[in-house]
Image: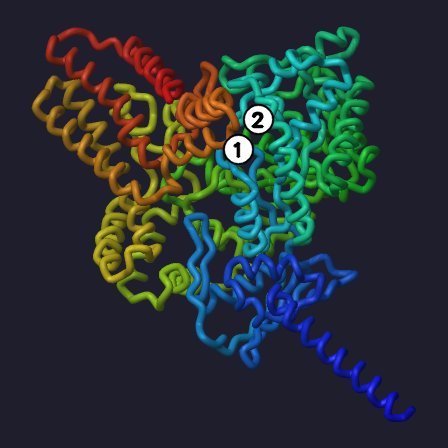
């Protein structure tokens, strides 16, 4: 009997050992052996970057029940990287911060660089941030960059967000499925909705009440495809302890809805941004339909995508509110109250999020009295104003830090996906340190960037998202050294660093690319604007072109010492196309002046020089698939499941970055410094123009610029429609 007990105990012991060993092996295979279930999502993010070496990371979340600020601690011991943090996003940021600090990894839109050491160096670091939220993504990004993204691309971006510490991302995909269901409940037909929805690339501006129907219809497949995508996006964001900002009702209804409800108080608004767009229709805040529609939308949205805590609603984005002069402030207060109460009743405890852009864009209307009235009936902790244009407007200072409401500080940096090489690292640093010391900063709870377009100037975003953690205390040059060591996969030389010092002094000292608007004409460079003879009065682009050339010359020599796949080659191309685009602008002015003075010989010489530079730029950019019009149009076309849908998507993609739409001043707003655009779009326009200008000079006849620009516009239309 005793012998039998012994055998049973021995057997159980061996089974237990085998079970523990099996768990260990299983955990190793999955990459979670040193992490608990709470950190599984963070571990997966790190694993997608460094593979099985994630097994050498021990991740621990320690939640604080009283403190809302995020923190982390990192320490290496016995070839184990121990990371503790407040949540999954803080853990991901800490892991990436460690890897980049030691030069082992860099994560960017142009690709990831991973160069892991055989053993982890001795390292210890603690970090925390005074900002509860780090925001990301403009409402417009979902038109200018992401419309053709699939889950693989979104997963890549969410990983990027996590590793840059972002926890308040704007999440606008998939909402048209909810709107469609809502409007059908109110009796709108398929044909009425088809006439309502804008094309895929233009949905952001329809959501904000600026346009209807432009470049539509919206294909049926779009609704289901984006619905499934948004479910995955929100699931992953929430698993990483992020707080996605999702859509709410801001008062806009389809034209067909307004016609079906003549008894309702619905205002038809005048055309947005210079005219040419279909009218939009806004329900009055006091009409019972406002709350009824708004609550029902959130109910439908919640059923589709789950509960949310942050809802974006912008009733007056670049639109002057339809309020009476004699009762202006009370009516504004009613609009603010209606939006808040609608969200609160449908999602109790949730926060209304609004963009602060309108307060800087229309300072004449949004006086302190108007803004404070609009916000007055909303509890301070239930509204968040995203004041993200501090590289252009000082809204928070002018609006007394939003009168006690929660607000976030940040930058747009990128407009329309247009991509000159620029940013201002020292400006961001000095602004942050000044903000943190300012006794009048009010209830600032967040920080970040909300670019309209992505995939350019990676260094700007890398730096901006370190600032809320290092609080601006790290010298820019120290930060830059670590960044470049990781980016170029080795300790950089003094010469290479000198090139970057010159870049900081020449292009990365420009906080806003102001000449993208010149004489009310959009376009990153003169070359990118619809041609005009008045460019002889152009005051010039920002930055220091002489120092830029010095940096370019050094980079060109240094790049020869590196592998062809090293990111120094990518940076060399970026700096080159920027420098030569600036040079072309100068030559264009001189060429127009020459033909104007009937100096045909000089004009022809400059014409040939410009053409060669354009073709050279286009050629060198062929190695950057990320910056390619062919890739942009192909991704749009591939998103469709039939030839007809693919054609519509491709036309949307081409029109957005050129004509934009309407008869206003938005053409070339989203101009792109891309392979294929120089040779295939920008130069053909200027070539037509300059040849006609020369002809008038040779024949001594008046130059009809209006006629020529109309011919160019017709050429642009053909370009967008030609596959």
- Mark 1: secondary structure: loop
Image point 76% across, 13% down: which residue?
187
Residue 585 at x, y percent in the picture: 26, 32
The image quadrant that residue 647 belongs to is top left
Residue 117 at x, y percent in the picture: 44, 72
Give me the C-alpha separation between circle 2 and circle 1. Answer: 9 Å
Label 1 crowd (10 A; few <14 / some 14-19 / many >=20): many
Q: Nearer the viewer, residue 475 or 558?
A: 558
- Residue 701 is left or right of residue 572, and the answer is left
523 up-or-down from 428: above or below: above
The image quadrant that residue 340 belongs to is top right
534 up-or-down from 360: above or below: above
Q: Are marks 2 and 1 in contact (CB under 8 Å)?
A: yes
Whether residue 475 is visible: no
- Mark 2: secondary structure: helix
Residue 98 at x, y percent in the picture: 52, 67
Image point 76% across, 36% down: which residue?
302
User: What residue did someone put label 1 on?
Assistant: 147
- Residue 122 is left or right of residue 376, and the answer is left
Q: Nearer the viewer, residue 436 or 312?
A: 312
On residue 257, the disc is: none
User: Among all residues in the image, which is located at the extreme left?
Assistant: 601
Whether residue 460 is visible: yes
587 up-or-down from 555: above or below: above
How is the model colour-coded? Answer: rainbow
User: What residue did someone put label 2 on?
Assistant: 203
Exactly how many numbered labels are in the figure? 2
Image point 53% across, 66% down: which residue?
52
> Quadrant location of the C terminus?
top left
């Amino acid at each position: 009997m005793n012998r039998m007990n012994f055998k049973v105990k021995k057997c159980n012991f061996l089974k237990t050992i085998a079970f523990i060993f099996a768990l260990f092996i299983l955990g190793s295979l999955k990459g979670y052996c040193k992490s608990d279930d709470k950190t599984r999502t963070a571990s997966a993010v790190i694993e997608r970057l460094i593979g099985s070496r994630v097994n050498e990371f021990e991740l621990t979340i320690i939640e604080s029940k009283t403190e809302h600020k995020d923190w982390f601690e990192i320490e290496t011991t016995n070839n184990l990287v121990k990371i503790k943090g407040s949540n999954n996003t803080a853990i991901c940021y800490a892991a990436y911060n460690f890897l980049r600090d030691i030069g082992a990894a860099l994560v960017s839109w142009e690709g990831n660089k991973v160069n892991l050491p055989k053993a982890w160096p001795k390292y210890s670091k603690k970090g925390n941030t005074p900002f509860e939220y780090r925001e990301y993504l403009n409402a417009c990004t979902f038109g200018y960059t992401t419309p053709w993204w699939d889950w693989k691309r979104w997963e890549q971006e969410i990983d990027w967000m996590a590793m840059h510490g972002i926890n308040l991302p704007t999440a606008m995909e998939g909402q048209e499925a909810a709107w469609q269901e809502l409007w059908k409940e109110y009796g709108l037909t398929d044909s009425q909705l088809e006439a309502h929805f804008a094309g895929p690339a233009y949905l952001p501006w329809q959501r904000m009440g600026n346009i209807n129907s432009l470049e539509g219809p919206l294909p049926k497949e779009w609704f289901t495809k984006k619905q499934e995508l948004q479910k995955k996006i929100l699931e992953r964001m929430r698993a990483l302890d992020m707080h996605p900002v999702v859509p709410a009702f801001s008062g806009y209804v389809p034209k067909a809805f307004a016609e079906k409800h003549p008894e309702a108080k619905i205002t038809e608004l005048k055309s947005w941004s210079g005219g040419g767009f279909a009218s939009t229709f806004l329900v009055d805040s006091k009409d019972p339909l406002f709350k009824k529609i708004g609550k029902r939308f959130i109910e439908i949205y919640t059923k589709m995508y789950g509960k949310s805590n942050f809802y974006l609603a912008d009733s007056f984005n670049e639109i002057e509110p339809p309020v009476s002069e004699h009762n202006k402030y009370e009516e504004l207060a009613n609009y603010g109250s209606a939006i808040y109460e609608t969200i609160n009743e449908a999602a109790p405890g949730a926060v209304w999020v609004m963009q602060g852009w309108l307060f800087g864009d229309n300072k004449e209307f949004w006086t302190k009295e108007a803004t404070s009235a609009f916000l007055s009936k909303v509890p301070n902790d239930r509204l968040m104003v995203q004041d993200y244009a501090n590289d252009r407007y000082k809204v928070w200072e002018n609006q007394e830090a939003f009168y006690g409401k929660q607000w976030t500080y940040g930058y747009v940096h990128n407009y329309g996906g247009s991509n000159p090489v620029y940013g201002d690292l020292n400006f961001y640093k000095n602004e942050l340190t000044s903000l943190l010391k300012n006794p009048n900063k009010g209830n600032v709870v967040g920080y970040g960037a909300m670019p309209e377009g992505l995939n350019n100037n990676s260094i700007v975003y890398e730096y901006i998202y370190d600032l809320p953690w290092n609080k601006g205390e790290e010298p820019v040059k120290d930060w830059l050294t670590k960044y470049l060591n990781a980016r170029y996969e080795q300790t950089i030389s003094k010469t290479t660093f000198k090139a970057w010092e010159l870049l900081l002094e020449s292009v990365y000292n420009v906080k806003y690319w102001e000449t993208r608007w010149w004489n009310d004409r959009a376009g990153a460079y003169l070359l990118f604007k619809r041609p005009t003879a008045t460019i002889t009065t152009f005051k010039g682009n920002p930055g220091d072109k002489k120092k830029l050339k010095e940096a370019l010359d050094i980079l060109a020599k240094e790049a020869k010492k590196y592998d062809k796949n090293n990111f120094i080659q990518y940076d060399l191309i970026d700096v080159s196309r920027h420098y030569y685009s600036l040079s072309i602008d100068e030559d264009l002015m001189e060429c127009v002046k020459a033909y104007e003075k009937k100096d045909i010989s000089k004009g022809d010489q400059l014409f040939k020089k410009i053409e060669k530079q354009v073709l050279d730029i286009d050629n060198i950019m062929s190695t950057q698939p990320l910056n390619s019009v062919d890739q942009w149009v192909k991704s749009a076309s591939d998103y469709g499941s039939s030839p007809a849908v693919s054609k519509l998507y491709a036309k949307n993609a081409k029109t957005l970055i050129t004509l934009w739409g309407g008869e206003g001043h938005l053409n070339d707003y989203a101009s792109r410094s891309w392979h294929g655009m120089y040779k295939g779009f920008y130069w053909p326009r200027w070539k037509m123009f300059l040849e006609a200008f020369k002809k008038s000079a040779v024949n001594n006849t008046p130059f009809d610029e209006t006629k020529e620009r109309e011919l160019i516009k017709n050429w642009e239309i053909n370009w967008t429609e030609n596959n």
